[in-house]
Image (cartoon, grey):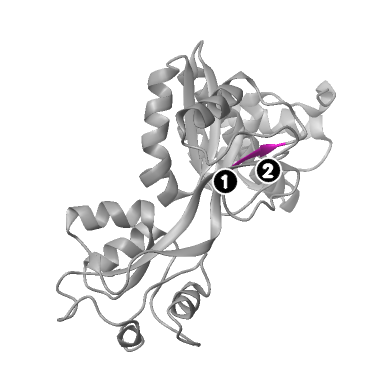
């Protein structure tokens, strides 16, 4: 059920308000919307009368939005952007069904992408849309069918399908140091690169080598891809996940800095909400992941 009609102003009025707030004057808003100055003023007046709150003040020939007008305009902008995105999705998908995924950037590029290409070849009638999200969110407030989650099966109210266990390897540029690979103890004296979402990763790695290391500092990155670029450029030693490291090693941009791959706590999952049944595109994707062997195990009832 939507709100009563009296709370749903015309798009033209809302566009006028948003443009005035964004551009600062009714004259600039009129140019932006290809309207006359009087037309913009008229739309604002109609909107004000419909809402029943003062949205602007006249200062000579100029208009100035009230605090209520500014706040309303910013909320309107969010709604207009949501409407534009919804329209774009419909236009892009046409008669095809859409699967909307929230993905982790590096995993989406270097692991999921190749699997999605195979899925699209098997299901050309399904359009796969992807958006980057680096943190868990509420499925009730985000328009996604499923998301990629790293860690444990702890996303509240969601089913979990494990895709890949995490393994990492310490790598550096080929010319970074002589005598590569180094003993783990030698890495304690090297510049170590860190990922924001993996606090304690280096401490865990050294612990797996039998070394107690604390207070490790170094350059900080928000994405594996950025950290890999810095590593290839000689900035230091990084722990890269296997799905990314194998590509970088194959290209010769990095080499092992010390021992081989190490298992770490953490799994990449596909997660989707329990409060609604999986639609046809998502159900098809889940079946394909399991049938193609991309998932680690079948989806069990109640997962």
- Kindly identify the residue that appears in the image at 78 percent across and 43 percent down: 54
Judged by its main secondary structure, the magenta piece is: strand
Tell me if I can see residue 152 in this picture: yes
Q: Which residue is label 2 attached to?
A: 75
Residue 169, x across and y down, in percent? 36, 65
Q: Is mark 1 on a helix, strand or loop?
A: strand
Q: What x and y, as percent, mark residue 47?
A: 73, 31
Q: Which residue is drawn at 53% across and 41% down?
A: 296
From the viewer's side, name the closer residue of 88 and 61. 88
| The residue stretch that appears in magenta | 269-273
The residue identified by callout 1 is 269
53 in relation to 3, above or below: below
Instruction: Please give the name of the residue rendered at 27% of the width and 51% of the height, measured from the top-left corner.
Output: 247
Q: Left or right? Give the position of 279 relative to 33.
A: right
| Quadrant in the rendering for residue 113 | top left
Residue 61 seen in the current view: no
């Amino acid at each position: 059920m939507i709100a009563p009609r009296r709370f749903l102003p015309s798009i033209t009025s809302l566009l006028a308000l948003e443009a005035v707030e964004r551009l600062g004057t009714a004259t600039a808003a009129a140019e932006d919307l290809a309207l006359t100055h009087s037309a913009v003023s008229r739309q604002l007046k109609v909107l004000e009368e419909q809402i029943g709150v003062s949205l602007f003040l006249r200062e000579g020939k100029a208009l100035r939005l009230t605090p209520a007008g500014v706040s309303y305009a910013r909320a309107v902008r969010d709604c207009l952007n949501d409407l534009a995105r919804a329209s774009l999705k419909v236009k892009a998908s046409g008669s095809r069904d859409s699967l909307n995924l929230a993905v982790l950037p590096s995993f989406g590029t270097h692991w999921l992408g190749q699997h999605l290409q195979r899925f699209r070849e098997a299901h050309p009638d399904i359009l796969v849309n992807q958006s980057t999200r680096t943190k868990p969110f509420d499925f009730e407030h985000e328009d996604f069918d499923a998301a990629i989650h790293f860690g444990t099966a702890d996303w509240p109210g969601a089913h979990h399908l494990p895709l890949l266990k995490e393994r990492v390897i310490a790598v550096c540029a080929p010319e970074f140091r002589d005598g590569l690979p180094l003993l783990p103890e030698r890495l304690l004296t090297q510049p170590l690169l860190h990922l924001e979402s993996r606090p304690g990763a280096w401490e865990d790695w050294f612990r797996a080598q039998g070394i107690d290391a604390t207070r490790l500092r170094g350059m900080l990155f928000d994405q594996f891809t950025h950290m890999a670029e810095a590593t290839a450029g000689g900035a230091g030693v990084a722990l890269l996940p296997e799905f990314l490291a194998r590509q970088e090693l194959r290209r010769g941009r990095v080499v092992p800095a010390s021992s081989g791959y190490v298992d770490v706590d953490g799994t990449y999952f596909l997660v989707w909400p329990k409060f609604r049944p999986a639609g046809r595109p998502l159900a098809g994707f889940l079946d394909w992941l399991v049938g193609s062997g991309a998932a680690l195990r079948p989806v069990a009832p109640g997962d």
